[in-house]
Amino acid sequence: MGETKRILIVDDDPIVAESLAEHLSGEGFETATAMNTAEARALLDGASRFPTGDGRPPQPVHVVLSDVSMPGESGVDLLRWAKEHHPTTAVVMLTGYGTIESAVEALRLGAADYLTKPVMDDELAVALERALRQQALVEENHTLRMQLDDRFGLDNVVGTDPRMRKVFELVSAVAPSRTTVLMSGESGTGKSLIAHAIHHRSPRASKPYVELSCGSIPETLLESELFGHVKGAFTGAHADKKGRFLAADGGTLFLDEINSASPAMQLKLLRVLQERKFEPVGSTQTLEVDVRVILASNQSLEDLVARGEFRQDLYYRINVVKIELPPLRDRIGDIPHLAEHFLDEQGRELGKVFTGFSAEAMDALRRYSFPGNVRELGNIVERAAVLSRSNTIGLEDLPPQVLEGADAGLLRAASGGSSDDAIDDEGSVWEPMPLVEALKAPERRIILNALEAHDWNRQKTAEALDINRTTLYKKMKAYGLDESRRAG
């Protein structure tokens, strides 16, 4: 059985209010009455809300059935207030002297329907059915919007590294504007998530968000994907097609891997970014759009410009606000937070309760280089969560490349060399050394990375490493780390 629907009847005539309540209760609705707008607000917004009388907490109202003319504030005033403070509640207006003008005004303000007294039972049933459909749709949209905010809000972008905090600050600063944003970073660093966050924190949040990876579309089809085409524009164009720019009109368009666009496509993009105008393929009609554009590249556009592989004028046009996302291997301190975040997600998805990672498993994750960045970490945690027979993720739950990569990372640190140095010309592995000595190299690297991340502020570095300043000073001295290295 579905949820019983709750109707609030607002009328200054107690006979009318009670008569409607009795009729609707007989039709299976839960009802409550109010004699004026103030009482209605208290039931909608106050501690009493909707009195159930059966011990349940007060419940929200699905539909308000309100008279238009009442002493003091009118039903139209209640309608305005309800649309602002309770947008998921539908409102049906009742009046004893209806006019076309008053009906139009009520509907313009958001009323689900407008009925003239005396109301016939079948008229009321149809109006309530329509109002409940509207209420369900609005509530579903509201729920979806909250889910999107939960998924793509900044609170969901995990990161305590100072560079990520700077990214969050830039997102908050740039989101309210329509300024073009350029993101750079390796594949898997979270560029799409940041683009979503910008959109959902912007005034365009209720408008479309459209995403396209330029590198995944063949050059011959990219123009059609972006700008659309008309029927017959080329072989296989059997019907008109709306492009991504038009689909994102009023909202945000995220173009990933913009570095893969050809020079000809770069020129077309430059024009649409400057003029907000374009022509679909095969058409002479010029279309104009209002689109906020976010672009991303997994290669250095500066280097591509220097080599003549990316238009300089387009680069200057899109490089208004630049957000650089660091690779995961450069923010080791975020790995535990991200891993726990992904594990929590998988626990909810799988209906499992996880207590976390074993110390050995987390250490292996810290020492792995993550060539696939955050995306790879998410996949690794998902695999571990699905395959694990325990509520704690252990070494045995991690894939071979993580264990091998972690061992190679420790070996490189212990030998002071690169991955190529870890194996000699004859294929034999470096001889192990005492653990105390082997741990010095990775500890030195961790301290150096933390110092550089905090601009060599020793107090902040010590706090980030969870050690006191005296310990940090001693280790810096032991490892030859001082201010003079900042220039290196």
Image (cartoon, rainbow, N blue to C red):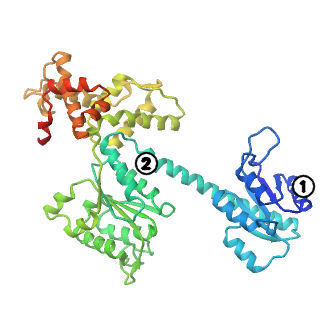
Q: Earlier in the sequence, mark 1 or mark 2?
A: 1
Res 154 label: 2
**Front position in the image: 22 or 97:** 97
Check disc 2 and give the amino acid type. Answer: Leu
| Left or right of 284 in this view: 26 | right
In the rendered view of the protein, which quadrant contains the C terminus? top left
| Image x and y of residue 443, in percent | 22, 26
Report which quarter residue 235 is drawn in. Answer: bottom left
The residue sitting at 37% across, 84% down in the picture is 284
Residue, disc 1: 22
Asked whether residue 400 is in view, the answer is no
Asked whether residue 103 is in view, the answer is yes
Residue farthest left in this picture? 425
- Position above or below: 4 against 239: above
Report which quarter residue 229 is drawn in. Answer: bottom left
Res 87 label: none
SS category of the residue bearing label 1? helix
Distance in Å between CA atoms under marks 1 and 2: 49 Å
The residue sitting at 75% across, 76% down in the picture is 102
SS category of the residue bearing label 2? helix
| Left or right of 355 in this view: 397 | left
**Front position in the image: 66 or 46:** 46
